[in-house]
């Protein structure tokens, strides 16, 4: 079994994603819209599995976490107070010859155009927030921004949650949702896009706990990556230097992943101090401090922020899982996805589609498994080899075939494992238990 050489691996992943219905180019029939991608049926299933696992682990299974789902459009004062209107920018340079634009900090030679070798102009700061107007007027008072991170929606709701549920510190707010960044150079498939999705936590703590909580969340993030099946050897921690940290952060770790196009940020962990609550208190005039019933002290909570990009998680999983098997009779491609995230868990086939007794029995097995495992598909299209290839390419862990022995001799079904191609016979009454164990 071989891993694909890295240079053309991305092309193959992009092609597979389109072919099998994971990810399509945004607005494709009109020539696309740079930095946007649409998720197809398999992509949505993979994305939802990631989000559901995340929500279960970090919200539902905990007693100190509260979910919110805030509006994407927010009052412009939010982004003034958080510093985004003045500092959420990247250095932009334009080629004086071909007029193409680049992010200055991503160029090896900041003076020469990487495309036409023309001279690059002076760098200027380009604010990445998408600006729009809310309502029928288009003056400055109606300006609104599509949120550039989901965090803002949690800080402005801090007091609401305190007032309605009275949580005790430390506790967290969590949110999964869209964010928008007008990236100068969207690239690398779904890695750098203009419309993205984040899974974020703002964990509120007394200041004195920041170091231990930072360490706790660092380990939680590593555990999460392991739990969804990412290879630990491809994950690296980068302590971000003070001059490279976001304006609100006193300590940041980037979790980087070895993508085929290089080692790049997958997730971030930041200590945001009391920057956000303090600034929103000052700007809004609403006191966002916390009163501790036990110590009788009032203070501004500090914040540890673990942040996870949904698209980057999906891309890391696809890159890590893509495998070409050249050892068998026929070379095959398969996605070695962990069953927890795999969009389809089990596929059921009748050996032949024109034999009603096989189709009927296969449908029976399919209905039984669908009730229990949900993401189960029925496929009778093409020969068995083709059906295996199709399921391999979308990462289905198990394929089940109903044949003549199943119906004539009550001899069970054939269960074939994706990674090894190994086949074994399992009696139908034990199939559920067998799969439950194998998928867990
Ligand atoms: P980068 O340095 O790659 O631009 P960032 O440091 O600006 O990322 P954060 O502001 O920390 O990113 O955003 C939190 C997370 O959101 C990132 O770790 C990443 O997973 C995701 N993310 C940020 N920008 C994008 C983008 N343009 N496209 C896809 N995901 C993104």
Image (cartoon, helix red, strand yellow):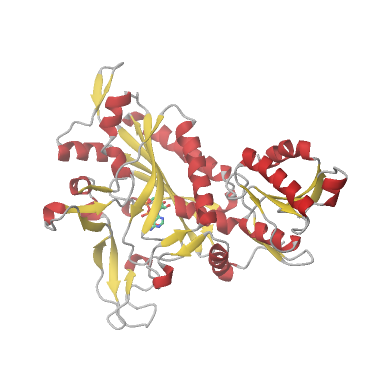
Q: Name the residue: 25% across, 37% down.
A: 277
Figure check: 410 above or below 231:
above
Q: Is residue 413 left or right of residue 146?
A: right
Examine the rendering and report whether any part of residue 73 can be seen.
Answer: yes
Examine the rendering and report whether any part of residue 334 can be seen.
Answer: no
Which one is nearer the viewer's eye here, 425 or 259? 425
Q: Name the residue: 28% across, 68% down.
A: 92
Q: Is residue 318 left or right of residue 129?
A: right
Q: Name the residue: 66% across, 57% down.
A: 391
Figure check: 248 above or below 393:
above
Could you say where residue 300 lies in the image, as x and y percent from the top left?
25, 31
Which one is nearer the viewer's eye here, 401 or 213? 401
Q: Name the residue: 33% across, 67% down.
A: 103
Q: Quadrant of the C terminus?
A: top right
Report which quarter residue 95 is drawn in: bottom left
Q: Quadrant of the N terminus?
A: bottom right
How many numbered marks, from 0 up?
Answer: 0
Which one is nearer the viewer's eye here, 423 or 351? 351
Could you say where residue 51 lies in the image, as x and y percent from the top left?
48, 44
Q: Is residue 248 left or right of residue 343?
A: left
């Amino acid at each position: 079994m071989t891993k694909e050489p890295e240079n053309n691996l991305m092309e193959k992943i992009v092609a597979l994603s389109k072919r099998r219905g994971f990810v399509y180019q945004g607005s494709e029939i009109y020539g696309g819209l740079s930095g946007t991608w649409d998720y197809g049926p398999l992509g949505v299933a993979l994305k939802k599995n990631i989000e559901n696992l995340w929500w279960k682990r970090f919200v539902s299974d905990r007693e100190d976490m509260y979910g919110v789902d805030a509006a994407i459009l927010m009052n412009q004062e939010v982004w003034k107070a958080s510093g985004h209107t003045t500092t959420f920018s990247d250095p932009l340079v334009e080629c004086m010859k071909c007029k193409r634009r680049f992010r200055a900090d991503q160029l090896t030679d900041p003076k020469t155009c990487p495309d036409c070798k023309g001279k690059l102009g002076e760098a200027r700061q380009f604010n990445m927030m998408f600006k729009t107007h809310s309502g029928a007027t288009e003056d400055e008072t109606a300006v609104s921004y599509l949120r550039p991170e989901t965090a803002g929606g949690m800080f402005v709701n801090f007091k609401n949650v305190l007032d309605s549920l009275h949580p005790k510190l430390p506790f967290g707010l969590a949110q999964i949702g869209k964010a928008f960044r007008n990236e100068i150079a969207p690239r690398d498939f779904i890695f750098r896009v203009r419309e993205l999705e984040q899974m974020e936590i703002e964990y509120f703590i007394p200041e004195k706990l920041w170091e231990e909580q930072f360490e706790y969340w660092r380990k939680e993030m590593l555990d999460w990556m392991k739990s969804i099946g990412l290879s630990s050897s491809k994950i690296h921690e980068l302590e971000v230097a003070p001059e490279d940290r976001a304006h609100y952060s006193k300590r940041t770790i980037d979790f980087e992943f070895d993508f085929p196009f290089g080692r790049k940020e997958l997730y971030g962990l930041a200590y945001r101090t009391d920057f956000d609550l303090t600034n929103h208190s000052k700007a809004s005039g609403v006191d966002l401090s916390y009163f501790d019933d036990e110590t009788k002290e009032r203070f501004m909570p500090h914040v540890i922020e673990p942040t996870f990009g949904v698209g980057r998680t999906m891309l890391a999983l696809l890159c890590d899982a893509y495998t070409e098997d050249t050892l068998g009779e026929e070379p095959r491609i398969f996605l070695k996805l962990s069953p927890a995230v795999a969009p389809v868990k089990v596929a059921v086939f009748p050996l032949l589609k024109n034999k009603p007794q096989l189709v009927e029995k296969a449908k029976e097995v399919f209905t039984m498994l669908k009730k229990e495992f949900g993401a189960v598909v029925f496929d009778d299209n093409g020969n068995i080899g083709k059906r295996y290839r199709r399921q391999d390419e979308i990462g289905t862990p198990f394929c089940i075939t109903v044949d003549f022995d199943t119906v004539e001799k009550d001899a069970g079904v054939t269960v074939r494992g994706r990674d090894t191609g190994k086949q074994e016979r399992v009696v139908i009454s034990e199939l559920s238990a067998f799969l439950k164990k194998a998928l867990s």
